[in-house]
Structures are given as C-alpha cells and as structure tokens.
C-alpha cells in the first residue's frame, strides 16, 4: 500500500502507534438548498490494539464518522490517517483497495450474501482479491472456529440465526487481517443474549490478535465492554470515559442528552 | 385517484416504463410497416396492370407469357362479334447496358413489347415526348425509367437481347399512370418485326389484347373466344391476371403477418415479465393500499391503466418509427426483384397497428394486474415476499406435450403439397405450441442451462462467475421468461436459417453429384415474374467454337401455369449430350432414357409423378401455345437440381410445344482441367461483348449466387426477427435492472468489503451473458428442431431435401449473443457500479 499513498500537504504527522488519526474532520451534506453539517471538526486518535466504543444521540454523526473512516465516503475537510496512511484525496480505486485490505466492516444488518455458504462468505474478501478458494479454506476454518461456528460451515445464511449470521460477519471482517475493524451498531438487531455473545467474541478477538476495533452502539452495557468510550454530540466529540463502568457511561449519556 | 397513481407509477419507474414503451414502439412499428409493405406490393401490381392494360378488356395469351399464340388466331379473334380492336404483340426482357461499363443490375432490365407500329395502343399510357415508333431499331421507353437512367428522346441505347447486343434509338417517352415506378424495371415498345429478330421469336404472338365494342357482352365474347383457342392458350381479363398474382402475394403476406405477429407476441411477453416484476417489487405498497381499503378491482385497474397509458404513447411513437421501417422493408423487397412502387400507407394500418399494440400490452399486463389484485393486505406487514414453489412435474409434462404437438403440427404443414387453411393453421399453431411448450419448460431447463454455461465464467473469474450464476438461478421464473423471449426470435431466425441451409446444402450436394459441367452461361439477373431473359442458340455455337471447349449444350425452360405439370418447370435439353452434363438420379433403370427423350419421351420429377399418380410407361399430354403433344414417361427423377424438379424433354419437343427458341442456360464442358481458366476467360469476353446480360459461372460461382439469392429472399424475415430480438433484449435489460435493484444490499456489501466498480460491472455483464447465451442456445435448439421438422416434412412430400445445420447462423447467433449480452448489460452494470454503498448497506 505504501507506494499508493498520496501525501497531502500537512503540518501534522500521526504518532507512530496511531491506528486512526483524525484532525479537523468535517462533513457537510448538501441536499438542494439546505445543507446538513454532520461532522463539525473531529479530532481523534486511536492507538493500535484499542477497542473503542462510540456513543451519542441519534443524528450526532456516529455513522458518518464510521463511513469516512471506512473509506466509504469522502470527508469535506480535515485529515484522516488509517494505519499511518492518509486517505484524503485517494481515488476510488485506491479507496477500494484500502477497504479490501486494510479495513474490516461489520454492519447492523447482517449483510451476508444469501447464495454463499458461511465459509464462502468468510472467504469472500479474499475471493474478491482474486485469491483461489483452495488456499483460503484453512484460514476461513480458523476464523469460523474462532467465532464458534465450526459446525455451520456449509450452511447458507438463511439457515443461520441472526446472532450466528453476525458472527459470520465478524469472521469475514477478520479474513484479510485488517488494520482497523469498524462495527456500526453490530448488536442493534440482536436480542440481549445474542448481543452479549457477539460482543464477547469481539472482545476475545481483540484480546487475542490485538486488532483495533471501533464500534458504534446505543447500549451502555455493550459500550462498557470497550476499553474506551467516546461521545459525539452535534457532530463534535463531547468527552470520553474509560470502559468497564456502565453506570458512568449512562451518566455521561444523560448529561449529553439534556 | 387511480389515474394519478397509475401515472405516478409510470413516471417513478421511469426506466422500466421507457423499456416497456420501447418494446411497444418497436412492435407497433413492425406491424405498421408490414401492413404498409403488403399494401404497397398489392397497389403496385394493381396500378401496373391498370396502366399496362388500360383499355384492354380481354387478353388471349399462351402460358407464362413466354409461350406463343398461333398467328392464325388473330384473324379469327378479329372476326368474333363484339371485338372492336385486337392487337397482337410479343414481349421479352432485355437488359440495358450501362454507359459507364459497369455490370448491369436488376434495375437495368426492360420489359419490351414488340407491336405493329400502326396498331391501336390499348395500354393506359400517354405520350409525353417524341413520336410513336415507326420502323427499324426504334424504341419507346417509360418516362420514369428513362429519367432514372438519364435517357432522353434522340439518345441511342445499347441493350442485350436474345440475339446479342442491339442498339436502339429512343424516339418516344410515355407515362404510365401517376408517378408509377415498376420497382426499377423499365417498360419499352419496339416494332414487331424487329422484336421477332432480337427476341428470337420468329413466329407466333405472346398475346392478343382485345378491346370490345361499346355495348358488347363480355361473357358472350369470352365464351366464343374460349371456343376458338386450344387448352394451352388462355383467355383472361386483366383483373384475372392481377387476381392470380394477388393470390400469390397473399401467400407471402401471410408469412409476413405471421412473423410480425410473433414479434408482437415477444413484445407482449416483455410487458408480461416487466409487469410481473413491477408487481413483485410493489407487493408491500399494494398490500398497504389494500389495508387502507383499496379493492381488488381498484388495484387491478391501476395496473391496467398503466398498461393502456404505455400502450397509447408507445403506439403513437411506433407509427412514427413504422413510417421509416416501411421504407427499409420496401427496399429489401425491391432487392429480391419484385416490382414495387411508391410506398403506400394504408389508413387501416394507422388504426390496426396501435390497436394491436395496445392489445398486446393489455394481454401482457392482464395476468400481473389480476395477480396484483389478489395480493393480501398482510403483504404490507410481511417484509419478505415468498414466491410460490413451482409445480415442476406438471410443467415438465405439459411442456413436453406441447413441444411434441408443435413439432407434429409443423411437420403436417411442411409435408403437404397443397396448403389449405387447416394445414396452414396446423403449422401456425404448431409453432405457437412449440414456443409455449418451451416457455413452460423454461424454469426447469434454463437454470440447468445457466449452470452449464456459467462453467467457463466460473473458471475465468471464480467469484464473479459464481455470483452471476447464483443471481440468474436465484429467480428461475424470471430468468427463464427473459431467456424465452430471446429464444423466440432466435428460434425463428435459426428455423429460417435451417431451411435456407438445407435447400442450399441439398442443391449443392446434387450439383456436385449430378452436374458435370464446368461452366454455365445464364442471365446475370433474374426478372421477378413475367418473361425471363433467354439467350440465342447462336451463342451456344459461338462458345462451341472457342478453343478449349469440348461440349456445349443449351437448355430451354418455362414455368407452367396451366395443364399437366402446373406450377412445375418444363425443361428442354439436348438428349445427345445429356449424359455428359448430368447423371440424373432415376428411380427406375435409366439406361435407355436419353434415347427415349430424343424421340417422344419425358422424365418427371418424383413429387409430380406421385401427386398425379403417373408411372413409368404412362403417356401424358402436354399442351403448349404452339401445339399439344402426347409424350411417354421414360423415367422418374429424384433430387433438387432444376432438371430433377422439371418435366424434361428434348429441345425439339420443347420448341414444338411451347414455341420458345432462346436458351435459358448454356452448359459448357472444357477439354481438360488445364484448359478451364483460359476457356472461362474467352467465354466471359465473348458473353460480355455480345450478350452482356449473361455471365459465365463456374459451379462454385453458381452455388455462391444461389446462396446470395436465398439470403436476399430471407433478408426481410431476418429484419422482422431482428426487431423481435431487440424487443427481447429490452427484456434482458429490464430483468438485469430488477436483479440489480433487488440485490442492492449484496452489491453494496461487495463494494464495502473491497470490490472495485469494474468487478461489480463484470458480475452484471456475466449475468447478462448467461441470459443471452441461454436464450441463444435454447433458440438455436428449438429453431433447428423447427427447421428439422420442416425439412423432413418437405422431404416426405416432395423429396430431395436433407437437413443441413445452418452453420453460418449458429456462429452469427453465438457471436451476437455475446455482443448483445454486453450491450444489454451496459446500463444495469452502470447502475450497479454507481450504487451508493452507504445507502445500500445501511438500511433494511
Ligand atoms: N446522505 C445524507 N444526506 C444528507 N444528510 C445526511 C446524510 N447522511 C446523514 N445525514 C445527516 O447527518 C447527520 C448525522 O447522521 P448520522 O447517520 O451520522 O447519525 P448517527 O449518529 O449515526 O445517528 P443514528 O444513531 O440514528 O444512527 C444527521 O442529521 C443526518 O440526517
Ligand atoms: Mg447511525
């Protein structure tokens, strides 16, 4: 990837250990005569191996932030560095490569391809990259073992429960060993039991392999499993608390919403 | 309220509405232009006859114009009570030699009549320049031909006639009717004595045109005349002749109508699939309307109204396109050599085309609309609409039965020599049954076909190929109906192609086996109907004198329109050299046939002998304008060559019966292989110098020419089917767009986890290729089955045709399937590639 980096003229350089480094990030949606300022100047640094939860009221800009970090959307202004590489000004082709090789995504709606088996869904990012299925199978098995679905390899998504589907999504997001794992409300569609299972697993993964994870959630209990919780309000970062204590998180949320 | 909803539905699903609309536009344009074309052909002939026979009440003529009427008949005719004027004439085709030295074409042919300069003119023409012909090599020409060729009064023109090159002075220009153009063919008149020489018709008349005295009873005169003439001569009114021709045109028209009806059917099918998709897509919305109290009828009405709206707009635009398409068709028909005049748009076409268009739209929309009406309100709450499982076994049985019935019906039509209405219906319903059967089998067959066809794609690009195949197989009904739409057009193309290749193949097999000539001298263009150009027997002597020529022999030919052998060719040949030129395939022992031919015998085509129940040794009577003769059947012949399809006799007997002296072909054998190239050169030089309307062709060139001619005849059907195929491609685009829409989420996920835009495009293109190639494979199979049934049927009745697969068509279809696949995918692939990833993955 190094040769593809387009350095933008910039004063600040990210610290060496930053997985995500954001400075002065804004996002304005122009829709006809009105424009919505979804992000109004975000500054954020996430170290390698951190598990960060993002919280905030509806419309505060959480998803927008995730989309920009995930190279799905362009920023209006500011700087964004992922794994030591600036992504501002990259063309579509390079953004695609970034998504494929450096970023893993877990969506709220399980987003598996319905005609592919669990195993094939896990291998999908590498299949897209043109690798042959034979060589990928072992790695896919490891990942399915990791998420506890060894027995479900040959099942189609329609034969899996919501929680199981989401666990396949997690395995898929790890397939290319990405620098950054982004999850936008991954448990939003699950009941509390399944949500807890998925979260435990995410934490396991993070603990074992040291991936950097950013997760949006509305659930304080879910957020409390993260190592750090940051809060967004009206497109700006409005404080942060360390993970672990759900009550403290709830308190901060309450303060935000009033 | 309903109207507003219907309108909004059209405008909100703009692209699909445009595609549907285009389908209707094309279908209506086709119907419109076919109706206009057939009207134009009919009017052309009507006008042609009324101008040529302007004041003629009755015509006495020999069979097929080329035959002659005995000269002594003229005085007898004139003596008949009630006959006012009787004008004798002979006629033939000559070819104008272009001044610039280029090869003469179809539009250089002049239909020339030889008349006594002093005789009354009974045609509907009027003189516009110069004076009437008097004597010698003078010619009167029709104005529009002269104008087109840049000829004026006083000019000298060179024409190739039966006796060779002749120069005529143009002394008069005449005008037939208003702006009438005989499809490029010119009309001319020359003095009778000159015509006798240059046409090589020393005796007899081609026809005697009669005008009656005012108040004379047509029936009485006609009866009296019929008493005067023998059976080889006919008494007809101008309208008898035009009715004859019209009934032949009618056959051509029915085929045209059938093909355009098939295209319209494909159009209706497009609408059906498309509305089915719209209904599937709007399930929730419809359910909602029902929850809010909308009745079944209201929902169905909403969809039907949408269809009417589409049908109306599409039909109007279709007429506009139809005006243009007619011109194209008319020029294609002109290429085949049929005279065709100015384009006529019949008022009925302006009504029939849009009515049929709207009917097809409604037919297509009816089932989906009723289905929409039956959507239960619960659908509003259910997120996923589940399609009913298909009844596969029932489909398989019903489909196979229909296919079998269809092929049987087609065989019935093809295997009958005559075509009464029930047989034609059997054929037409056969084709429709066959298609319906295949459409029924579609959801069973197509997914399997897609699986096989996707194999190379999956090898080439594993994940793209896999996803493309999954998408096609995921909705078998939709995929199958889309491919089936394409199947119909391609099947008809393949069926026509099979007929063509089987005829060409069988005839060239026979040529290879039977014809042992090195060269054939024949007219370079064939007149469409009417007298054919012939070449003087002198030409054969001249060729025989060329160095390198071993044997030279002329054949005579005439198409019989009456008597024994009606609708067959009579052929005259030289029995002495017959064995050198051909080795006929006789059903009986052929040892002494040539000797028998030299005296008083004929050979018959197998089909004719069968139809007439004539056996070897029987005697038949052939009646010609010159005389009648009783001849013995020496042999019965199988095969496809002109000889094998003709009543064959000696040149002498032929002349004695039909009075035709010119040769239609001269056959040449070279002394040796080595002498061939030089001989061809010298024949070409001779023919080009003295008989420029003719050319010398090697056997290979004859085959090529035959292929070209067959392809020209088929061109119009290919054009009609091309429209059907384009309409079905709109269906492919429709289906792909729907698939893209339904898979928004999946495509979004692919993009989010790192698929490039091109990778997404490739998936859609491959999906399109799978659809078009499935349609193509299915179409080729069905079309060849259809062609096979047809060929076998013809073989069973007339014999001599074997099935030859249309190799050229197969390759062309395979190539086009790929090209069309890519083209159809352009728009849907663009949609998929430009999809907003965030929207695609974020919402349910
Ligand atoms: N494509 C868009 N066009 C216009 N405005 C948008 C668009 N996407 C988001 N917005 C606006 O930007 C703001 C931030 O939206 P975002 O989706 O980031 O909120 P969120 O914090 O994820 O909310 P939620 O918790 O409800 O998911 C909102 O006001 C939203 O309406
Ligand atoms: Mg959000």
Image (spheres, grey):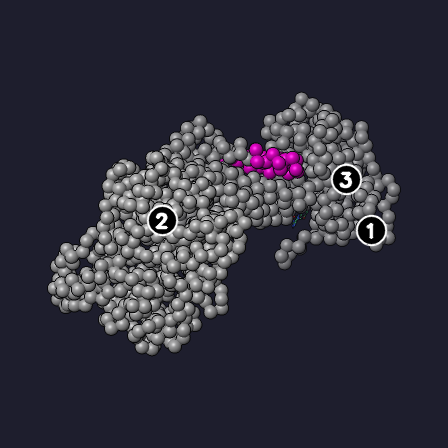
Label 2 crowd (10 A; few <14 / some 14-19 / many >=20) = many
Q: Residue at x 30, y 40 (%)?
A: B634
Magenta stretch containing residue B454, yes or no?
yes
Residue position marked by numbered label 1 in the rendering: A7
Q: Position of residue B437 (x, y in %)?
A: 41, 35
Tell which of B674 and A223 is nearer to you.
B674
Q: Position of residue A81 (x, y in %)?
A: 80, 46
Describe the element under mark 1 as helix, strand or loop.
loop
Q: Identify the subunit bearing mark 1.
A: A
Describe the element under mark 3 as helix, strand or loop.
loop
Q: Residue at x 37, y 57 (%)?
A: B537
- State how far apart marks 1 and 3 are (Cα): 18 Å
**In the picture, which quadrant includes the C terminus of chain A?**
top right
| Image vertical order of residue A56 relative to residue A174, above or below | below
Residue position marked by numbered label 3 in the rendering: A102
Specify the quadrant of the image occupied by residue B797. Answer: top left
Q: Is mark 1 within 8 Å of ligand 1?
A: no
Q: Position of residue B685 (x, y in %)?
A: 49, 61
Q: Identify the subunit bearing mark 2.
A: B
Residue B829 in view (yes/no): yes
Label 1 crowd (10 A; few <14 / some 14-19 / many >=20) = few
Q: Residue at x 72, y 26 (%)?
A: A141
Magenta stretch containing residue A19, yes or no?
no
**In the picture, which quadrant includes the N terminus of chain A?**
top right
Magenta stretch? B452-478
Residue position marked by numbered label 2 in the rendering: B574
Tell which of B485 and B40 is nearer to you.
B40
Identify the disc placed on residue B115. Answer: none
- State how far apart marks 2 and 1 are (Cα): 94 Å
**Chief secondary structure of the magenta portion:** helix
Describe the element under mark 2 as helix, strand or loop.
loop
């Amino acid at each position: 990837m190094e040769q593809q980096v387009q350095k933008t003229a910039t004063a600040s350089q990210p610290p060496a250990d930053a997985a995500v480094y954001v400075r002065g990030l804004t996002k304005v949606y122009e829709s006809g005569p009105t424009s919505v300022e979804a992000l109004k100047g975000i500054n954020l640094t996430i170290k390698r191996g951190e598990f960060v939860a993002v919280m905030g009221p509806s419309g505060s800009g959480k998803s927008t932030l995730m989309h920009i970090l995930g190279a799905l959307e362009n920023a209006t202004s500011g700087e964004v560095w992922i794994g030591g590489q600036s992504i501002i000004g990259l063309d579509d082709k390079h953004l695609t490569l970034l998504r494929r090789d450096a970023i893993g995504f877990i969506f709220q709606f399980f987003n598996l391809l319905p005609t592919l088996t669990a195993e094939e869904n896990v291998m999908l990012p590498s299949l897209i990259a043109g690798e042959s299925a034979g060589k990928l199978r072992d790695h896919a098995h490891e990942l399915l073992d990791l998420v506890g679905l060894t027995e479900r390899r040959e099942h189609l998504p329609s034969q899996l429960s919501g929680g199981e589907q989401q666990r396949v999504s997690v395995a898929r997001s790890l397939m290319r060993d990405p620098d950054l794992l982004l999850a936008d409300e991954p448990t939003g569609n699950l009941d509390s039991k399944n949500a807890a299972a998925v979260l435990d697993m995410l934490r396991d993964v993070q603990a074992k392999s040291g991936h950097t994870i950013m997760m949006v959630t509305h659930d304080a209990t879910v957020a409390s499993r993260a190592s750090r919780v940051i809060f967004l309000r009206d497109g700006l970062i409005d404080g942060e608390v360390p993970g672990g204590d759900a009550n403290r998180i709830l308190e901060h949320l309450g303060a935000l919403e009033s | 309220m309903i109207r507003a909803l219907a309108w909004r539905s059209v405008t909100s699903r703009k692209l699909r509405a445009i595609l549907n609309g285009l389908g209707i536009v094309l279908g209506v344009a086709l119907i419109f232009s076919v109706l206009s074309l057939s009207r134009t052909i009919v009017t052309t002939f009507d006008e042609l006859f009324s101008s040529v026979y302007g004041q003629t009440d009755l015509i006495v003529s020999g069979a097929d114009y080329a035959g002659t009427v005995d000269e002594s008949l003229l005085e007898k005719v004139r003596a008949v009570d009630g006959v006012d004027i009787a004008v004798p004439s002979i006629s033939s085709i000559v070819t104008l030699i272009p001044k610039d030295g280029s090869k003469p074409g179809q539009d250089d042919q002049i239909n020339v009549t030889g008349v006594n300069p002093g005789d009354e003119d009974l045609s509907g023409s009027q003189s516009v320049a110069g004076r009437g012909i008097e004597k010698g090599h003078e010619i009167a020409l029709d104005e529009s031909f002269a104008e087109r060729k840049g000829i004026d009064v006083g000019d000298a023109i060179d024409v190739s006639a039966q006796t060779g090159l002749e120069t005529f002075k143009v002394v008069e220009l005449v005008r037939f009717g208003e702006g009438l153009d005989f499809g490029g063919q010119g009309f001319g008149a020359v003095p009778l004595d000159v015509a006798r020489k240059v046409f090589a018709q020393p005796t007899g008349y081609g026809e005697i045109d009669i005008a009656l005295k005012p108040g004379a009873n047509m029936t009485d005169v006609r009866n009296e005349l019929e008493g005067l003439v023998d059976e080889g001569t006919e008494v007809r009114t101008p309208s008898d002749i035009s009715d004859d021709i019209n009934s032949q045109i009618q056959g051509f028209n029915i085929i045209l109508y059938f093909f355009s009806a098939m295209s319209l059917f494909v159009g209706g099918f497009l609408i059906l699939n498309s509305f089915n998709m719209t209904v599937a897509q709007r399930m929730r919305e419809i359910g909602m309307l029902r929850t809010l109290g909308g009745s079944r009828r209201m929902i169905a009405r909403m969809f039907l109204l949408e269809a009417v709206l589409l049908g109306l707009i599409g039909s109007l635009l279709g007429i506009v396109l139809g005006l243009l398409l007619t011109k194209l068709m008319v020029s294609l028909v002109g290429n085949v050599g049929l005279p065709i005049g100015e384009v006529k748009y019949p008022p009925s076409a302006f009504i029939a085309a849009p009515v049929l268009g709207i009917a097809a739209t409604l037919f297509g929309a009816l089932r989906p609309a009723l289905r929409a009406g039956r959507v239960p309100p619960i659908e509003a709450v259910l997120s996923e609409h589940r399609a009913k499982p298909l009844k596969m076994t029932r489909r398989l049985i019903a489909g196979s039965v229909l296919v079998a019935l269809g092929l049987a019906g087609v065989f019935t039509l093809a295997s009958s020599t005559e075509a009464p209405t029930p047989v034609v219906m059997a054929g037409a319903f056969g084709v429709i049954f066959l298609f319906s059967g295949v459409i029924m089998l579609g959801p069973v067959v197509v997914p399997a076909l897609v699986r096989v066809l996707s194999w190379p794609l999956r090898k080439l690009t594993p994940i793209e190929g896999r996803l493309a195949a999954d998408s096609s197989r995921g909705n078998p009904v939709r995929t199958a109906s889309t491919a089936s739409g394409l199947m119909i057009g391609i099947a008809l193309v393949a069926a026509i192609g099979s007929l063509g290749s089987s005829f060409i193949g069988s005839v060239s097999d026979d040529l290879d086996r039977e014809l042992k000539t090195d060269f054939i001298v024949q007219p370079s263009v064939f007149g469409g109907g009417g007298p054919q150009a012939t070449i003087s027997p002198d030409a054969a002597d001249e060729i025989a004198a060329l160095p390198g020529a071993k044997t030279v022999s002329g054949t005579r030919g005439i198409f019989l329109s009456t008597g024994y052998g009606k609708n067959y060719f009579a052929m005259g040949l030289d029995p002495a050299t017959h064995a050198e030129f051909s080795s006929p395939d006789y059903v009986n022992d052929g040892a002494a046939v040539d000797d028998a031919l030299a005296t008083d015998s004929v050979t018959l085509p197998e089909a004719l002998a069968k139809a007439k129940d004539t056996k070897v040794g029987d005697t038949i009577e052939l009646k010609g304008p010159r005389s009648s003769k009783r001849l013995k059947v020496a042999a019965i012949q199988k095969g496809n060559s002109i000889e094998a399809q003709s009543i064959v006799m000696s040149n002498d007997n032929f002349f004695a019966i039909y009075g035709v002296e010119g040769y239609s072909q001269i056959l040449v054998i070279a002394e040796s292989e080595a002498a061939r190239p030089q001989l061809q050169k010298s024949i070409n030089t001779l023919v080009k110098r003295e008989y420029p309307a003719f050319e010398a062709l090697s056997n290979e060139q004859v085959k090529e020419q035959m292929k070209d001619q067959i392809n020209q005849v088929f061109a119009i059907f290919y054009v009609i089917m091309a429209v059907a195929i384009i309409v079905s491609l709109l269906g492919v685009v429709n289906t792909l767009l729907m698939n893209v829409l339904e898979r928004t989420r999946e495509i979004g996920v692919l993009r989010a986890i790192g698929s490039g835009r091109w990778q997404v495009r490739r998936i859609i293109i491959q999906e399109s290729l799978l659809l078009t190639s499935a349609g193509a494979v299915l179409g080729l199979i069905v079309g060849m089955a259809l062609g096979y049934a047809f060929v076998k049927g013809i073989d069973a009745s007339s014999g001599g045709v074997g099935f030859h697969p249309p190799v050229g068509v197969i390759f062309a279809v395979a190539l086009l399937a790929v090209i069309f696949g890519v083209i159809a995918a352009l728009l849907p692939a663009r949609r998929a590639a430009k999809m907003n990833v965030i929207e695609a993955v974020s919402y349910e």
